[in-house]
Image (cartoon, grey):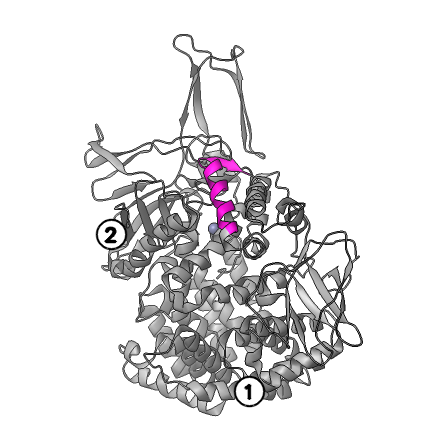
Amino acid sequence: MREIRRDEPSQNFNRNCPQSITLFEGGPDISTKITIVDYDHQFYYVLLKEELEPGRTYNFSLDFESYLDTDGTGFFRSSYIDEEGREIPVALTQFEANGARRAFPCFDEPSFKATFECHIAREESMSALSNMPLVETSPVEGQEGWLWDHFRATPSMSTYLVAFVVSDFASNVTETAEGLPYTAWCRNQEIKHSNYALDMGPEVLTFYAEYLRVPYLMPKMDIAAVVGFEGAMENWGMIIYEEDFMLFDPEVQTEADKQQVTKVISHETSHQWFGDLVTMGWWSHLWLNEGFAKYMEYLGANHVHPEWNMLDQFVVDVVQYALEVDSDETHSHPVIQNVSSTEDISTIIDDITYKKGGSLNRMMNHILTEQTFVEGINSYLMEYQYNNAYQDYLFEHLTIAGHEDGNLPQDMTMKQVMDSWTLQAGYPVVTVNRSEDGTSAIVSQKRFLFSNESTDEETWWVPLTYTSQDNPDFHHTQTMIWMTDEEREITIGSLPQKDQWVVFNIQETGFYRVNYDDNNWDLLLQQLETDPEAIHHLNRAQILDDYAHLSRAGYLSYSSAMDFFAYLRKEREYLPWASALNHLDYMELMLSDTAPNEPFKKFLLDLIVPLYEEFGFEVKDNMDQQEQFKQMLAIAWACDLGHENCIENARRLFNDWMESPDEVNSFISPNIRATVYCSAIAEGTVNEWNFAWNQYLRSSSQSEKHRILEALGCSRDAEVLLKFLISLAKNISEDLDEYASLLIGLSKQKVSENIAWRENNYDVILHWLQEHNYAPSLRNI
Ligand SMILES: [Zn+2]
């Protein structure tokens, strides 16, 4: 599943419950004496007339009635508007984590695996899909115009992965390399945009089967894009996506959108093994699903687009993001967390489970080496296929592989190492204090927290790697020295003389931060200022990220952090920039409404202008993805910081569009549209705003609608914004995503943010959301 939260409206459980029960074995009916429904804990108790005898087979049958709600859980109803403006219904499922019980009676926990035979009655004009292929269709007796679809029984699987979709969707079919049918489904007017998914989906499915050396074990794959579905769900053989996560329209969507679609499809596809074939025994071990899917998502995307450099992007997108979340006591928690009630499940669908989980998989890969890691994963999947597993099972298989290959010391186990990372919250900052002559260092560990109030109790098994200026090697990422959980500090020798730098945590493969003594930091700064390329680009991103966060937590000073940021004028690689701008964005927010605000903006502009001048607004066909991303960053920042030439260009492009409203695709490249819209509306008058609003109403593309809505919030005209918020709250559709886009846009603007809050419009929106029985949640992208 993608990381989105779902709240379980327990009142719906009352509506969907068994009506009558029979339990029999051949002759006598020994059904219920009494039944009790515990609505709070979602249990249904049946007290029998007689005791059951062990060893005999009983049949248990329930009449069950359930209703299609519209809340996105269980078997629910959605709809879309077709080309003629008619509202067309779609019925579909979202069972993770505990929605299956709302569609049919079942033991609705992941370890109760069973086979499922689905029979779905539908109107002739619709079609039904499920996990398995259709066997036959027959008329529904006594109901003219209705048909039964009978599906083949599934293999043994968990309830939360059962799925069905009833719709009038168009389809587009291809085959995997193994000859299995792979079909994309969506509303007719979007079907041409499923071509990209249909190209890369089967390729990534075959890649995983080969990489893991475990075949894809279902007889087909269906993928469906559904308006009104939130996120994506990896149902076995029947993946469901929200449209933006499966469909790709190169005329409207950006290079970042394309990467997003690639990652989400790779993510859900990898779940066919991690989650569907081998399932966590209980929700507390969810990271075995999601940590793997997050990691495999980048491997899959890297296979389809090796030129995108996805494995390196993982460091900034996932590792550094997880490190930040895990630094904050209010968000940090152990990867393995007790989940005792159904309500608790939603609390672990978060960045710790997904992104820290994914980072730990990458760390294990580098501890053991790729080959040994895959060897361990393969034997783990083979042993527990069609079954359930806990993290200890995984660690056992990795340990055996590590010992066999000699890549894990015989006196160590992966459980020993990894328990320290999964059973306790947080991670360490490793401090390297070099001796007077530089040739040795005391290396210590301590939990890193923004509050800088670590109690010193926690320790980890830290895989240390390092290299130095006299003999730089940024490719050897296997553990060089272990710091055990019993060692708060160790001494390392054989380092270079004091005028040569050292860098620890090569390519940031370990899930920890590094701090150095002042002298080593100075040497690193000099290197970055003179010849940054001498340090691997991932370690440049790491140095910036660690320095900034160590400053935020008070270990180091912000004035030196600024020195480090200043070297960016020389930086030409995307990832160090992306890493730095994440933090500069945070600083800009913190500094707003303060005295240093304006000078800080000048500083930022000074950094960004060389990058802006390198690319400008010209979109060239031969730009690789990293160049496109750099251009997007440079333009977004330059315009936001008020760079004259940038704003002029944005307004010129927007004016061209206003003169030919149907020609946006030929005027403005999708990559730069968000910035062009936002800048033109921010700097423009009510005319620009009204034009964009009309375009928003006219557009049928979900991506374009979100983009325009975000830009509408860029206006600096308080009156316009206020009218906008009120009319939106009153008139617009029930799509929560649209509010989310608006709020994201507003939050970018201090002036509009103030207006929104001062005038209590936020309350208007909140009230609306409550009335519609939604919890306020933002799109989690
Ligand atoms: Zn997932």
Q: Is residue 67 left or right of residue 185?
A: right
Instruction: Please provide percent x and percent y for residue 741.
Output: 46, 66
> Which of the two marks, 2 or 1, is nearer to us in this view?
2
Residue 674 appears in which quarter of the rendering? bottom left
Q: Horizontal and vertical percent for residue 368?
A: 56, 53
CA gap, disc 2 and disc 1: 49 Å
Name the residue rendered at 52%, 44% in the picture.
8
The one nearer the camera, 362 or 547, is: 362
Badge 2 local density, few (<14 within 10 Å), some, or many (20+)?
some
Residue 328 to residue 752: above or below: above
- Viewer-proximal residue, 528 or 221? 528
Q: Give the magenta part as a residue range.
A: 372-389
Depth check, front residue: 104 or 52: 52
Q: Nearer the viewer, residue 678 or 768?
A: 678
Residue position marked by numbered label 1 in the rendering: 605
Amino acid type of the residue tagged 2 in the rendering: Thr
Q: Residue 155's image quarter?
A: top left
